[in-house]
Image (cartoon, rainbow, N blue to C red):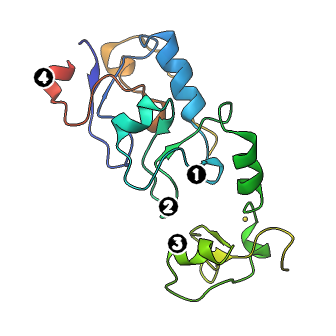
């Protein structure tokens, strides 16, 4: 395939990826459209949807280290307007979140109460909280290395990698 192969401990970062500046333009465009913050992801599918099923729907699929963040999601360009309005109600800074549940509440129980659910890395912030106004918190890194040596042609960082393989691809198949 002529691609690069490096393991990553970050979920969703491909092991097999195109050399710098060698990916087809359409794949680069698609990868850029899918590079959005966890808080901007709007679910495009159902719980347990596979990567293949998600991509067949024309959506993005990327793992997240943040619990409750969808793996299959719309690009910002393709999301239906009514879904945007719903998500914007839950875009609340940590300092403005008012608890709407209890410790250990499930995502489904929280949302069934009409509340929002999103994990926070800050201690003491409720995961289940009221929607905005009812009661009352990375820009992708671009690799700028210009050395055209083979090592630098494969030095693309994390989510800037454009997938060149499939789940379970071996290093031999990738190269």
Quarter location, residue 51: top left
Residue lying at 54% horizontally and 88% vertically, measured from the top left: 103
Residues under labels 2 and 1: Cα distance? Answer: 8 Å
Which comes sooner in the sequence, label 1 or label 4? Answer: 1
Residue 154, above or below 47:
above
* Rendered location of residue 170, percent (x, y): 15, 30
Q: Which mark is residue 108?
A: 3
Q: Which residue is mark 4?
A: 172
Q: Which residue is mark 2?
A: 66
Residue lying at 49% horizontally and 85% vertically, measured from the top left: 104
Contact between labelled residues 1 and 2, with CB atoms less than 8 Å apart = yes
Q: Does residue 49 appear left or right of residue 41 in this picture?
A: left
Which comes sooner in the sequence, label 2 or label 1? Answer: 1
Residues under labels 1 and 4: Cα distance? Answer: 33 Å
Residues under labels 3 and 2: Cα distance? Answer: 16 Å
Residue 127, above or below 66:
below
């Amino acid at each position: 395939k002529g691609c690069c192969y490096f393991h990553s401990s970050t979920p969703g970062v491909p092991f097999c990826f195109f050399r710098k500046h060698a990916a087809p333009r359409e794949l680069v465009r698609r990868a850029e459209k899918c590079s959005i913050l966890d808080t901007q992801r709007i679910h495009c599918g159902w719980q347990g949807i596979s990567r293949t099923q998600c991509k067949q729907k024309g959506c993005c699929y990327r793992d997240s280290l943040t619990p409750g963040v969808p793996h299959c999601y719309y690009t910002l360009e393709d999301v239906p307007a009514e879904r945007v309005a719903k998500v914007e109600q839950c875009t609340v800074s940590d300092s403005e979140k008012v608890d709407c549940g209890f410790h250990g509440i499930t995502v489904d129980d929280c949302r069934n109460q009409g509340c929002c659910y999103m994990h926070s890395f800050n201690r003491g912030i409720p995961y289940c909280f009221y929607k905005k106004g009812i009661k009352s918190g990375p820009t992708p890194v671009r690799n700028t290395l210009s050395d055209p040596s083979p090592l630098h042609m494969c030095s693309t960082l994390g989510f800037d990698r454009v997938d060149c393989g499939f789940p379970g691809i071996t290093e031999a198949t990738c190269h």
